[in-house]
Amino acid sequence: MEQLPIFLDIRDKRVVVVGGGTAAARKADHALRAGARVTVLADSVNDDFKEWADHPNLTVLSETPRKEHFQGAILAYGAAEDREIDLKVHALARDAGTLVNIVDSPDYCDFVTPAIVDRDPLLIAISSSGTSPILARIIKARLETMLPSAYGRLARFVGELRGRVMEAITDGPARRRFWERIIDGPVADLVLAGATEKAEATLNSELEASRREAARPTVGEVYLVGAGPGDPDLLTFRALRLIQRADVVLYDRLISDCLLNLVRRDAERIYVGKMNRDHTMPQEDISELMVRLAKEGKRVLRLKGGDPFIFGRGGEEIERLAHAEVPFQVVPGITAATGASAYAGIPLTHRDHAQACVFVTGHGKNGRLDLDWKTLLQPAQTVVVYMGLSMLPELTREFLARGADPNLPVAVVENATRRSQRVVTGTVTDIADKVAEAGIEAPALTILGTVVTLRARLNWYHPSSAASDEGDCLHAMPFDPVETSEFA
C-alpha cells in the first residue's frame, strides 16, 4: 500500500483551487459538496463553474497566486493546466504548510483525489495512487452499476438507529453480529425497497431477540475454510463471506499475506503452521484451541491452504468439534493437485493418457515411504504426490525399483497458481536432480504420468520471472461488511 486512504472532514475549512477550466471545476465541486469554503484563483472561469456561481462558500478571485492565499488552507489544487503556474502553486502551498495536489502530476501531489461512488452518506473511493486514473474510473463505473442509489438510504437508516442499538447491546462482538444480521438480511431488503417503517419494526423485533440471547451463554462457531493453492481469485464466494465474518483466525504457513488481508481488521490472528519436522503447534492443540475459542462465543476461522479434506487433517478437526458439540461449517477449496495441474497446463485425466488419478502423500514416516506401490504403478493413470519434495529422490528410486518406465514423465510445481510459480519437468530417472539443480522449495507438488507431456502445448500461465508473492495480493484494504467503528 503506497498511500494511506482516509476520509477527510473539510467542513467549513478553506480549500484553494488555482485554475478556471474543467479540471479546476471538478476539484471545486468535490470540495463544495464536502462543505469546504473554496477560493478559486483564475483570470476567468469557464461554464463548468456556472452551477455554483451563487454558492455562498465559493469565492472567485482574479489574482495571481501568492503565499498568503494558501496560509490557513487545508488543501490546495493546482489545476491551471499551465506547467509554470502549477509548479508555482506547488511551491507556495508547500511553503504555507498546505497539502497540495497538482493535476496530472503524481510527483507533485501530497494526496490524490480518488474516483468516487457517491451514495451519500456512503462513499466509496477508488485510487490507483496516481498511476492510472482511467483504470480507477472504469472500476468506479462498474461499482456504480452494482450499488443501487438506495444504499445511501440504508446507510442513513443504520446511522439513525445506531445509538439505540449501542444502548441495547453493550457487548461489542454481539453488537457487530447484530448489525451483520441486519445489513445482510430482511431488514436491509425492506429499507432498499423503501419500506422503512416495516424495516424499523423488524429491527426492533431483532433487537428484542438479541436482548434475550444476551442473557444466555453463547457458543460460537468454527468455519473450516479451504483457501485454495494460493491465488486469491480462486477463493469461493462463501469462503470470502466467512473470512470476513470471523472473530479469530487460525492459519497455516501456506496462507499468504494477501489472503490474510481479506480478514476483518480487528480479528485476532493466530499462526498454527507446520513444516516438515517443525510443528509450531501440534494438531491436537490446534483442535483444542478451536474448541476453547468457540466455547468463548467466538466465530473461529480455520483457514487452510488447498482443501481441508485432502491431506489437510480437516476430518480430524471437525471430529473434535462434533465431539465437543461445537457448531461448524466446512467450505471446500481448490486442492493443490487441481490448482497446480491447471496452472501448469497438465490435465490430470485425458482420454489418450489417463483414465484415473490417484492422490497420495509423500510425507514419509521415519524417513521411509509407505505407499501402495501396486496401486500406483498402473497404466493410464496419473499419480499426484503431496508433500513429497523432501522424499523425491527416495520416491523416484522406489518407482524405478518396482518396474516403472525410466522415461515416465514427471513434473514438479512450486508455489502453484502464484506469480512465483515454477515448473520443472523431466522423467522419473532425472527429475530429482533437475529439481535440486533448480533449487525448488516447498510448497511443491509432484505429478507423474504421460499427461505431463501435454504441458508443452497446453501451458497457458506465464508468470513474470521477477514476480514475488507480493504480486498475488489484493492491495485494497480488506472489505468489511460493516465497519469496525460501527460497534465501538
Image (spheres, rainbow, N blue to C red):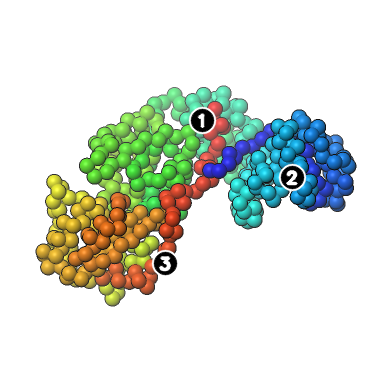
The label on residue 48 is none
Question: Residue 223 location, x and y as percent?
Answer: 38, 42
Residue drawn at x 79%, y 43% as measured from the top left: 18
Disc 2 residue type (three-letter): Leu
**Nearer to me, 393 or 280:** 393
Closer to the camera in the image, 71 or 322: 71
* Residue 143 in the image, given as x and y percentages of width and height: 61, 52
Q: Is residue 339 above or below residue 178?
A: below
Q: Is residue 242 visible?
A: no
Amino acid type, mark 1: Arg
Q: Which label's residue is closer to the chain start, 3 or 2?
A: 2
Q: Is residue 373 visible?
A: yes
Q: Residue furthest bottom?
A: 352
Give the percent coordinates (x, y) of residue 20: 83, 48
Location of mark 3 (residue): 460
Foreground label between 1 and 3: 3
Left/right placement of residue 46 relative to residue 290 reads right
Question: Closer to the N terminus: mark 1 or mark 2?
Answer: 2
Circle 1 residue: 175
Locate residue 444: give its quadrant.
bottom left
Around disc 3, counting alpha carbons within 10 Å, would you say few (fewer than 14), some (14 to 19), or many (20 or more)?
few
Which element carries disc 1, helix, strand or loop?
Answer: helix
Q: Secondary structure at mark 2?
A: helix
Specify the quadrant of the image occupied by residue 95: top right
User: What is the C-alpha distance between the residues marked 1 and 3?
Assistant: 48 Å
In the rendered structure, which disc, 1 or 3, sits on the residue that comes first in sequence?
Answer: 1
The residue identified by callout 2 is 87
Q: Which residue appears at 13% of the width and 60% of the height?
A: 398
